[in-house]
Image (cartoon, helix red, strand yellow):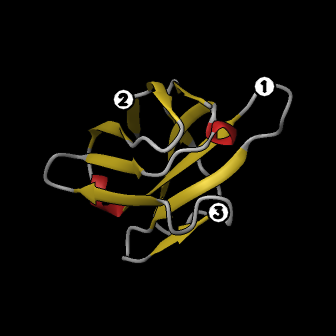
Amino acid sequence: QVKLVGSGGGLVQAGDSLRLSCAASGRSFSYYTMGWFRQAPGKEREFVAEFRWSGGTMYGDSVKGRFTIYRDNAKKTAYLQMNSLKPEDTAVYYCAARYMASTNYDYWGQGTQVTVSS
């Protein structure tokens, strides 16, 4: 199992940058695919990005070219670098983990609020 703690959210202006962190505890962090999701008020949860345990990344269409996901396995931490933020990026951001070939994200962080003002 892995426990996740997300952090780094805040209030920024449009065009600013912000970096979210997801610290994991437990064993075998390098064997987990790490993902970021977000949920805005009144909207469904949206996939943002993932970094696969085997390498490779994937992004949601709305953040491609602006957000970058990366990880430091030695620190057991995943990051989401968010650039050129827009008001529509305002949401609670959740980090999540799934083990190796699992198709479901089984572990979730508590969420961190990102608010982008225009």
Disc 2 marks which amino acid?
Gly
Mark 2: secondary structure: loop
**Tag 3 residue:** 60
Is tag 3's residue or tag 2's residue first in the polypeptide sequence?
Answer: 2
| Looking at the image, residue 34 lies above or below residue 2 | below
Disc 1 marks which amino acid?
Pro
Is tag 1's residue or tag 2's residue first in the polypeptide sequence?
Answer: 2
Mark 3: secondary structure: loop
Which disc, if any, is residue 77?
A: none
Residue 60 position within the rendered picture, expressed as x and y whole percent measured from the top left = 64, 63
Disc 3 marks which amino acid?
Gly
Residue 90 position within the rendered picture, expressed as x and y whole percent measured from the top left = 63, 33
Which disc, if any, is residue 41?
A: 1
**Tag 2 residue:** 8
Mark 1: secondary structure: loop
Residue 40 position within the rendered picture, expressed as x and y whole percent measured from the top left = 73, 32
| Residue nearer the viewer, 106 or 20 | 20
Cα separation between marks 3 and 2: 20 Å
